[in-house]
């Protein structure tokens, strides 16, 4: 029997999945969690066949990378709503085996879990097309450094001081980043930064410079987002 471990912040979704799986003979919900800590501990110790992870603000690439490292042979599926293409592309590169929309009919959601448990890759045709045709986003070292500081909650004046720039220059950088990333405000830009730039311990936020300190060393390299899905070897299970 296929065991599934679930992380979700929405009790209604959890209750619905529990009800559906209770009627299945080939699949069971081993546990459901609303907190990532106990969820990851369960995955590490119990090794369910499928790990179903709702994408929330708490789920970053650092989270996915750590989960992949402790999950063993468990197959990871992301339960998503509207998700940026860059996030999906990097998630697949990290070893996620399924991208499952929460709005799909329940029979397709169960089919996804079964397919992933059998070793297939599950990506909907429309999402696959968008991944393969999406343009890459290239961030310069300075743009990435600015996003680091923005994600820490710094204001324009503080960012300008930390980067030894004028506030006007910071505003120009932000304007370009809004256009590049497709963000509408500072919050969306900060969320983009947290979800897309920090994939592990080596990518931690660079602390802001304070008065009296020397300028921070420039160690951040440009980041390029590509549709890495095309490099996956297994055949895809595609939903039309």
Image (spheres, rainbow, N blue to C red):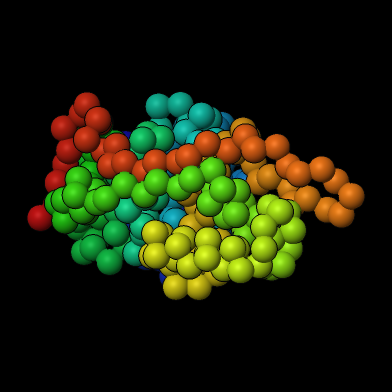
Give whichever of 90, 72 is nearer the camera. Answer: 90
Residue drawn at point x = 62 percent, y = 60 percent: 150
The quadrant in which residue 202 appears is top right
Q: Position of residue 37 (x, y in %)?
A: 63, 46
The quadrant in which residue 203 appears is top right
Q: Where is residue 140 in the image (x, y as percent from the top left)?
A: 48, 45
Residue drawn at point x = 68 percent, y = 52 percent: 163
Q: Which quadrant would the N terminus be assigned to in this image? A: top left
Q: Is residue 99 above or below residue 165?
A: above
Q: Which quadrant would the C terminus be assigned to in this image? A: bottom left
Q: Where is residue 6 in the image (x, y as percent from the top left)?
A: 45, 50
- Relative side of 129 to 153, left or right: left
**Which residue extends farthest right?**
212
Residue drawn at point x = 58 percent, y = 38 percent: 220
Give whichever of 165, 149 is nearer the camera. Answer: 165
Give whichever of 78, 190 is nearer the camera. Answer: 190
Q: Position of residue 28 (x, y in %)?
A: 37, 46
Give whichever of 77, 157 is nearer the camera. Answer: 157
Residue drawn at point x = 60 percent, y = 63 percent: 170
Q: Can residue 115 be seen in this view?
A: yes
Q: Is residue 77 visible?
A: no
- Relative side of 1 to 7, left or right: left
Count up the numbered dots. 0
């Amino acid at each position: 029997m296929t065991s599934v471990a679930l992380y979700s912040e929405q009790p209604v979704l959890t209750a619905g999945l529990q009800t559906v799986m209770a009627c299945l003979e080939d699949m069971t919900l081993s546990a459901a969690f609303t907190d990532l800590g106990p969820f990851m501990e369960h995955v590490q110790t119990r090794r369910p066949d499928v790990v179903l992870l709702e994408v929330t603000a708490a789920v970053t690439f650092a989270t996915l990378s750590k989960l992949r490292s402790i999950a063993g042979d468990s197959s990871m599926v992301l339960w998503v709503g509207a998700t940026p293409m860059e996030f999906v592309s990097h998630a697949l590169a990290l070893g996620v085996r399924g991208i499952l929309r929460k709005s799909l009919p329940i029979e397709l959601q169960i089919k996804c879990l079964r397919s992933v448990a059998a070793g297939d890759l599950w990506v909907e045709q429309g999402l696959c097309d968008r991944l393969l045709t999406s343009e890459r986003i290239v961030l310069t070292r300075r743009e990435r450094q600015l996003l680091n500081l923005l994600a820490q909650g710094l204001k324009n004046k503080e960012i300008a001081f930390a980067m030894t720039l004028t506030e006007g220059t910071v505003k120009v950088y932000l304007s370009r980043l809004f256009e590049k990333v497709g963000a509408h405000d500072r919050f969306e830009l900060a969320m983009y930064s947290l979800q897309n730039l920090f994939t592990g311990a080596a990518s931690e936020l660079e602390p802001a410079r304070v008065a009296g300190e020397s300028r921070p060393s420039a160690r951040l390299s440009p980041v390029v987002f590509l549709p890495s899905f095309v490099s996956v070897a297994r055949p895809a299970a595609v939903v039309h």
